[in-house]
Amino acid sequence: MQRYEATVVGSGPNGLAAAIELARAGLSVLVMEAQATMGGGAQCREFTLPGFVHDVCSAVHPLAVSSPFFSRLPLREHGLEWIDPPAALAHPLDDGTAVLLQPSLQATCDSLGADGAAYRKLMQPLVERWPLLARDLLAPPRFPRHPWAWARFGWIAWRDAKSAAESLFRGERARALFAGLAAHSMLPLEQKPSAAFALVLAAAAHAVGWPIPRGGSGQIASALAGYLQLLGGQIQTGARVDSIDQISGSALALLDVTPRQLLAIAGQRFPEPFRRSLTRYRYGPGIYKMDWALDGPIPWRASECATAGTVHLGGSLEEIARSESAVWRNEVNARPFVILAQPSLFDPSRAPEGKHTAWAYCHVPNGFHGPMVEAIEGQIERFAPGFRQRALARHMMSPKDLERHNANLVGGSINGGVHDFRQMLLRPTYRLYSTPAKGLYLCSSSTPPGGGVHGMCGYYAARRALRDRGLMSSR
């Protein structure tokens, strides 16, 4: 068998990013993937009916186009094409209108009425400095390279979203928009730093958009794999690694896994204090995900929702806050906050002519195994009466289903672990990417900067490994 200088376990975007950086440094690299198909959460399947292409996990990618690493790679040459819907996000309200988060900061301000000036004051400095801010946000803990941009961000970011929204805005529209963005944190909106997620997602929408990949999220993994193979890297699917001894022939091993799998694979190599620290790592709430094959577009009451790639279904700030807090009490709200994507409106390759797809999830307690179909579809019907009549077929994935698909989604947790203050700074421990075992590194979303399809966890892990061996890439 061929021996490789580096082995990467897991072919999600972070694993592929790590492999690319190692290959760019001139190392021979093998990526080993347990599943029959590569990509981790960045895959597509015909879950419902033939010809209907559904994103398995991630669907909309503001952090991918913001990624300092991805932006340096020739991914377009390997088939990755981004589509920007006219609006990044729509947030419908019960009065039949919707708030739009648009590429134009001015247009978004105009839609917020009396709160437009406050929104501009908050967002304009972040949008203008987004490339600098993104480099610090998508990095391990360090003194900011761009402290002025970081200071303007931190003024609001390290607050809880509920109090921040109530102090910044007077009207329901702006508060609801802010709450829905903050709910992506999967933290209670009364907990710090949930406001940071609202700022990041809003600034990204104005600076780079919330694009979707033509053909589905699997195109991201396919483009990364194509470039890796051009560099000489190899990918082996159906190759489960249960023990670090299986890859002992490589000088470097980078694992795109969470602390739970790291312990199972390599725990015997670690001293007891490090094992204990990994067992204390906390996973966040799970998600319950649904996909639909539709015989037409979603019949939104607020027609402007049809211009957005993503739709937040949750009503007011107070309602969204109740829904997110319930999850942390091991409960589910009767009206859960739902995040929905409708990619086929902008990418006809996702469905047969005249037909459409939709993708949605809500937050649930970690490992939750109860039904959520009625609750999720009820929220869609609330803002799009007649939606159920458009459904030709549906597919459900509970937290356990998601974990069976991808072992990194522990209990349905999609962010690699809780994003509170402690686990943002010590993710998963003070060692970040390295471990006490020589040549063994962690490169998953359980390391900084955390969840999202951006590849920066893998990139920084690879850089750490190269520095430790005196092999830092010159590129």
Image: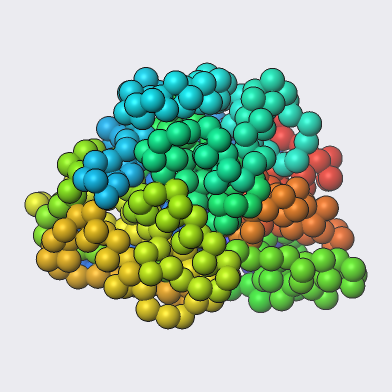
Counting from the top left corner in percent of width and height, residue 424 is at 70, 49
344 left or right, relative to 458 = left
> Please, which colouring scheme is shown?
rainbow
Q: Residue furthest front?
A: 170
Counting from the top left corner in percent of width and height, residue 139 is at 68, 38
Counting from the top left corner in percent of width and height, residue 197 is at 55, 43
The quadrant where residue 443 appears: bottom right
Front-most of 54 and 400? 400
Q: Residue at x 32, y 38 (%)?
A: 99
Q: Residue at x 66, y 76 (%)?
A: 242
Front-most of 181 and 37? 181
Q: Residue at x 51, y 46 (%)?
A: 182
Tag count in the figure? 0
Front-most of 33 and 384? 384
Above or below, 212 against 46 in this view is above
Q: Can residue 472 be spotted in the picture?
A: yes
Q: Residue furthest left?
A: 354
Front-most of 336 and 267? 336
Above or below, 88 against 344 in this view is above
411 left or right, relative to 417 = left
Q: Can residue 31 be spotted in the picture?
A: no
Counting from the top left corner in percent of width and height, residue 435 is at 82, 59
152 left or right, relative to 124 = right
99 left or right, relative to 116 = left
The quadrant where residue 246 appears: bottom right
* The C terminus: image quadrant: top right
Above or below, 306 against 128 in this view is below
* The N terminus: image quadrant: bottom right
